[in-house]
Image (cartoon, helix red, strand yellow):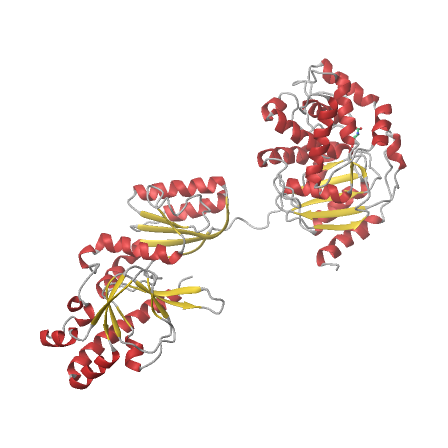
Amino acid sequence: MSTVVDALIGNVFAATRENRSGELADYIPELAAVAPDSFGICIATVDGYVYEVGDTRLPFTIQSISKPFTYALALADRGSAAVAEKIDVEPSGEPFNEISLDPRTERPRNPMINAGAITAASLVAGPDLDTRFERIRATYSRYAGRDLTFNRSVYESESRTGHRNRAIGHMLRSFDIITGDPDEAVDLYFRQCSIDVTCRDLSVMAATMANNGVNPVTRETVLEPALVERVLSVMSTCGMYDAAGKWVYEVGLPAKSGVGGGIIAVLPGQIGIAVYSPRLDEHGNSVRGVEACRALSAELELHFLHVTRAARSAIRASYSVVDSPSRMRRTPAERAALDDVGKRSRIYELHGDLLFAGAESAVREIGGVETELEVVVVDVRRVDDVGGIAGRMLDSLRDELTRRGCAVALVDPAGMLGYTHSDLSGTSGRVFADLEAALQWSEDTLLDRHCAALRQPAAIDVAQHPVLAGLRPEQLRRLTRDFDIRTFARDEQIIHRGDKACGLFLILSGRVSMRVADSGGAVYRIMTLSTGMTFGEMTMLLDLRFLNDVCADSEVTVAVLPADRYADMAATEPGLKLALLERLAAGAYEQLDVMLRSLLRP
Ligand code: GLN
């Protein structure tokens, strides 16, 4: 089925096809034997989809498009420093086959002109010519994702007529740029130029560069990212020879052409483009190839210096535990303390790709906050990618906040910043898998600092339970008799959704959570309760069924007032019933407030 993108590329193809200007390369006789009006365009995406229009499966020789790939192999074999001693990276402004070296450095000006490319071929490692060529052929094949073959007749044709390139080889030898046999280096270069590719192959090779060295179809890593950057740099400045400046100005993509009629262009991170059309302009670049790339760049907005928008702040939301409390139910004293000091916490939710600029705005805002912040949580769940520098900036920010006495934590279930949940404490702070846990930790940290004395003890007995506080001694004695003490193991289910009312539960130690499951079976904790809190009262008083599950989050002890005993008590002691109801109603109302605030969580 033809897609929107097929149509866009098809329009460029149709408009460019009319152009029949230019001549076939004939200085290599065999190149003049191709069908002059063949034309194909391919665009390969970094997720491995290839769009094709026209003659995209027709083989032709790669010629100079081989140069960046052999240069990459030389860099990988010898290291950047050793290669830099032999080949410069300055645009020459000269034709590809100029017999020249830079007069000052006495080196070829760049690896995209023949002098630099023959030197790069001479640097490919291997015990003999055949092995070195086989390494080159096998490497190109990995970029293309299929086994590429050698075109012997084009090779022999160039070998018979390539006196100019031999002259370049001998010049390189006389300046000690090539230290071995210059004819062998030139022969290796002729062979690499004579590898057959199709337009489709070239687009996948270009997309492998766009995809940071990983072939998007086979997923094989062909080149390390640091070298991809180097190769794309020289393609940007030198890939189109003496037309390189105009090319960047008009098309704005690292590119490479070949006299076989191919052109590749790379948009880093996005796509690889290949065009095949063998009529050439005076620079040796495909006429339609240049025109199609110019049109594609304009139509699809591909110019690599096109500024879509300035980097936006990486901070998507920021709030305190007052704005958005945890779902941990707190005692009235704790609630009051949190209303007072909760503003000293701040949760920052980051999003997007964190590169330098996004991280800069985030650390400037977080680090520059004037108020006495005591707890900072950085939530990176919505961050798509973290650059090395952004990670280091966030590390420094956390160290700086820690030095200022601030407790810091990350919400980072995917380990984007490289910390696992087991590196829990230490200078880097805590790492949480979900926001709720981080909010509870923020509140606990503030409560420990500011109202430790008021905090609920971890375990109490029935008579100490806050819901019974203020009852007269004889009321308390009468009521506590009716409670049964029960314990539950961690993860044990105390109540199931749909269960009938079974009494009033007072938590004497441990934590329980109210949970609901959605239609897909995902379980949500809607509230966590701890020592001193109650559950089951609404269902009991209204004789309803439970709307949620109740599960033990730790070992739990509860005191249960069964419904029938409550009914007896209510009938005989209306004053006691009233006192108890008032307290339960106050608790329920407070719980509603926390729920409402948690709905505002961004
Ligand atoms: N093999 C050709 C040569 O060296 C390659 C030139 C090119 O594609 N620009 O002349």
Q: Toward the viewer: 41 or 242?
A: 41
Left or right: 355 as drawn, with respect to 184 = left
* Viewer-nearest residue: 184 or 228: 184
Regarding residue 355, the answer to whether it shows in the image is yes
Q: Position of residue 586 (x, y in %)?
A: 24, 73
Residue sitting nearer the eye, 114 or 493: 493
User: Relative to 553, is 66 above or below?
Assistant: above
Question: Can the viewer see residue 112?
Answer: no
Say above or below: 64 vs 405.
above
Q: Quadrant of the N terminus?
A: bottom right
Q: Which quadrant of the structure image shows residue 256?
A: top right
- Please tell me which residue is depicted at 70% across the width and 43% down the height of the picture: 204
Ligand 1 resides in the quarter of the picture at top right
Q: Choose top left, top right, bottom left or bottom right for residue 512.
A: bottom left
User: Is 410 drawn above or below residue 181 in the view shown?
Assistant: below
Residue drawn at x 65%, y 27% is: 74
The residue positioned farthest toward the bottom in the image shown: 571
Q: Position of residue 525 (x, y in %)?
A: 38, 64
Q: Residue at x 67, y 36 (%)?
A: 236
- Quadrant location of the C terminus in the rendered image: bottom left
Q: Position of residue 590 (x, y in %)?
A: 28, 70
Q: Is residue 104 above or below residue 202?
A: above
Left or right of 265? Residue 30 is right
Q: How many marks?
A: 0
Could you tell whether 205 is left or right of 157 in the image?
left
Q: What percent of the width, then of the height, locates residue 309?
A: 56, 50
Residue lying farthest to the left in this orientation: 473
